[in-house]
Amino acid sequence: MKTADREICNGCAACYNICPQNAIEMKSDSEGFEYPVINVNKCNECGFCNKVCPVLRRYSKSGSVDNPKIFAAWSLDEEIRLNSTSGGIFSELAKLVLADKGIVVGAIYNKKNEIEHYAINNVNELGRLRQSKYAQSSIGLIYIKIKKYLEEGKEVLFCGAPCQNAALANYLNKEYDDLILCDFICKGVNSPKVYRKYLAMLENKYKSKVKEVHFKNKTFGWNRFSTKVYFENGDYYIKDKYDDLFMVGYVEKNLYLRPACHNCCYKGLPRVTDITLGDFWGLGKTHPELDEDKGTSVVFLNTPKGTKFFERLNGTVFEEECSIEDVLGGNLCLDASVPPNKNRQAFFADLDKLPFDRLIKKYGDRSKKATVKKFFYRKASVLKKKLTGLRK
């Protein structure tokens, strides 16, 4: 047997979960991305790995439409909204499932601040799933656990990248009424190795182990989101998206995305999930009256099941219907993959040789135009926040 080629493998681990012979392991390559490796001595060539692969067997969601209803939305619970990275809609959806004694599955930071998919059944753990994670999550054997929950008759909300949703659907190989698939507008997943390198740089600077990581922190507002990292010695680091080195390499430079993410086969419409969530970037241009700089989610209701589920939030969220044109202006990754940085290969060649800050300085330096643009964006963000405060 042969799994998908490295250039197109998205590391979803469906093959690892399905193999009846335990002949597949997920192993990290030199860039830090996990790929399946087949033990030929255990493999009986059953072909299950190829059947569940969302690249070799493209998944299409039953009932998903080309023209879904789209909403700008946020939680009416101010605490949930401010502690979420967009508008808090995922938390509100998760609360519905947990209230009915269901299971919610998403990415968490584990005790080592590494990222993995994890299942919760208690609303007290919801905060662990809430934040954005900007490196690829380890799936582990979560698909097996989800199938077990579904067979027990439990409602399950699964949140992950589009390819992870497609992988889960292929693995299950049947429709479950109690399963809600939820993806997000995905630019691509970053190298876990690069993420760890970034944290190591901060630990060296602050002379302490990292305690918590908060990407898209709203200290400076939603539009000018920041990265905030807490350390065991009580100190903390915070820089906005224009100055945090990890975000510069990711958002501006596309330096360390997984190779397959530069040619993703799950862009555009129809989607492979019941509900798609994202940040409603560009909202201030199309609907300035809705941009309070506290975080606004864009919500795509892709299937009748997704619509029915979202309607259960009645009274707990603000929502206003919008058009696809409103969304695309600030979310080009909904429809297209980003190209790799021309220095990507050289960056990874130096990954084990240089500390993270020197890597970004070498391969992520901004042009003069980008520096000027950053300056005016920050000034505009500060001014807008002051004007908003005056209006209140």
Image (cartoon, rainbow, N blue to C red):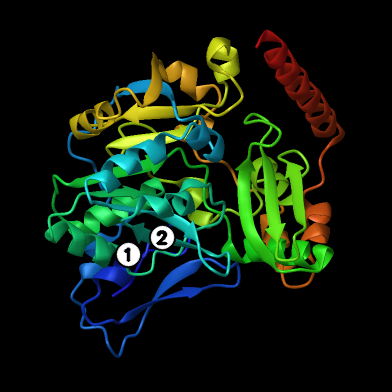
Of 346 and 170, nearer the camera is 170
Point out residue 59 in the picture as x, y percentages from the top left corner. 26, 48
The amino acid beneath tag 1 is: Ile
Alpha carbon separation for disc pair 2 and 1:
7 Å
Nearer to us in this view, 197 or 206: 206
The answer to the question of whether label 2 and label 1 lie on touching residues, with beta carbons closer than 8 A, is yes
Count of marks overlaid on the render: 2
Q: Is residue 309 something one can see in this rendering?
A: yes
Dot 1: few (<14), some (14–19), or many (≥20) neighbours within 10 Å? Answer: many
Query: Relative to residue 173, is residue 23 drawn left or right?
Result: right
Residue closest to the eye, 272 or 390: 390
Q: Position of residue 283 (x, y in %)?
A: 55, 19
Q: Is residue 17 above or below residue 371?
A: below
What residue is disc 1 on? Answer: 142
Task: Name which quarter of the figure residue 38 lies in.
Answer: bottom left
Mark 2 surroundings within 10 Å by alpha-carbon count, few (fewer than 14), some (14 through 19), many (20 or more)? many
Name the element at disc 2.
Answer: strand
Which residue is labeled 2 in the image? 117
Quadrant containing the C terminus in the rendered view: top right
> Residue drawn at (41%, 34%), measured in percent from left and top?
89
